[in-house]
Amino acid sequence: MDLSRQRRRGVPWLPIFLAVLCAVGRSVTLGSTQRKMLGVAVAAKKVAPTRTMLLYIVSHNDDYQRERILELEQTFQDKFLVVWDNNEETTCPFQDIAACLDNERVGISTKQRFNYICCGLEKAVMWSIDNRSQFDYVWFMEDDVHYTAISELVNVLGMPSMADLLHQRAIETVDHEWSHAETVHQQAGQIFGSFGLRRTMLNFYRMSSPLLDALAKIYDQRQQQWIFFESLIPTAAEFYNMTVDNWTTMYYQHSNYQVVANLRFRPCFTTFPTPGFYHPVKYRDGSFQNCTVDDVYVM
């Protein structure tokens, strides 16, 4: 998919975002013995700044989402991609303001890697796998993750971490009380063997290119079938001895002011008294809607 379309200019937060990313580069200095052997003062070498993408998975077209996507597009420009997740309305309605991946322009369907057009996350992961040579990390954000200011999002995406998986919530071991446990064990047994399966919520998180390499390998081993992502992603990261960290904890450590990262399953948030991130947030018909733990499914 060609993301080189013309982007809007005059963005206040883009320079901040790029400056923070550049700070992630690590300095590598030769030892004193090596410097003496060379007989010259050697300046520190710097690794190139990391390349980071943000994929925004959205299923609704309303004023709230349109305003947000426009802001994200203006802020991150060619580092931003909308993933349209609505099988009833297959054409992305945000093409006029942002680069958008939908069922008609999935970009990877010619490789016959999709068994069917499924969920937005599957499309986002498959696009990331097929384009992983173009970036070092990719962030995934669902449309019901609410942030109170774009500056907070810029700060999170620029945090100095080289972890392969930055997750939002503590990783747990899959037990039989989890509703998806039986399915996940059936799907993952041939891949992970006796290795204990993991699970975590995945609403706003980051994966590295090496982790995407591992997911592609597993996908091919299972004859192009996925395992439930909330178990597959953290299990693969730990199975392959990759680095894992919690971005919400890191954000508290690096933030200059008090923020919150309230990311839970239910109930829905309808007010945001403290700056930060909230999940789930359902905006419908002009207002933020409530939902409870008893709601089976909330779009």
Image (spheres, grey):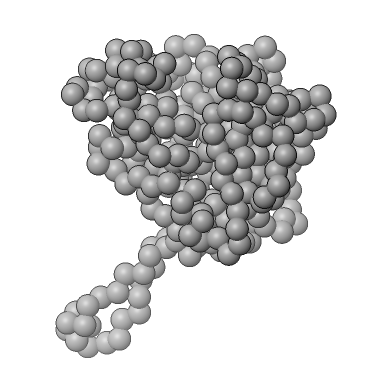
Q: Judge by depth and name the residue closer to the eye, 125 or 179.
A: 179
| Percent of width and height locating residue 196 | 24, 28
How many tags in the picture? 0
Q: As rendered, which of 176 and 28 lies closer to the eye?
A: 176
Q: Is residue 37 left or right of residue 24?
A: left
Q: Position of residue 208 (x, y in %)?
A: 40, 43
In this view, 237 is above or below 180: below
Instruction: Reply above or below: 199 against 150.
Output: above
Is residue 102 found left or right of 127 in the rendered image?
Answer: right
Q: Residue at x 42, y 27 (%)?
A: 230
Identify which residue is drawn at 29% across, 43% down: 242
- Residue at image position (73%, 27%) is 289
Q: Judge whether 14 appears above or below 137 on screen.
A: below
Q: Is residue 156 above or below residue 69?
A: below
The N terminus - image quarter? top right
Query: The C terminus is located in which quarter?
Result: top right
Q: Can see residue 18?
A: no
Residue at 75 percent across and 57 percent down: it is 10
Residue 29 position in % (x across, y down): 30, 74
Q: Quadrant of residue 69?
A: top right
Q: Nearer the viewer, residue 216 or 160?
A: 160
Q: Nearer the viewer, residue 75 or 206?
A: 206
Q: Position of residue 280 (x, y in %)?
A: 61, 31
Q: Residue furthest right?
A: 286
User: Is residue 181 visible to us here?
Assistant: yes
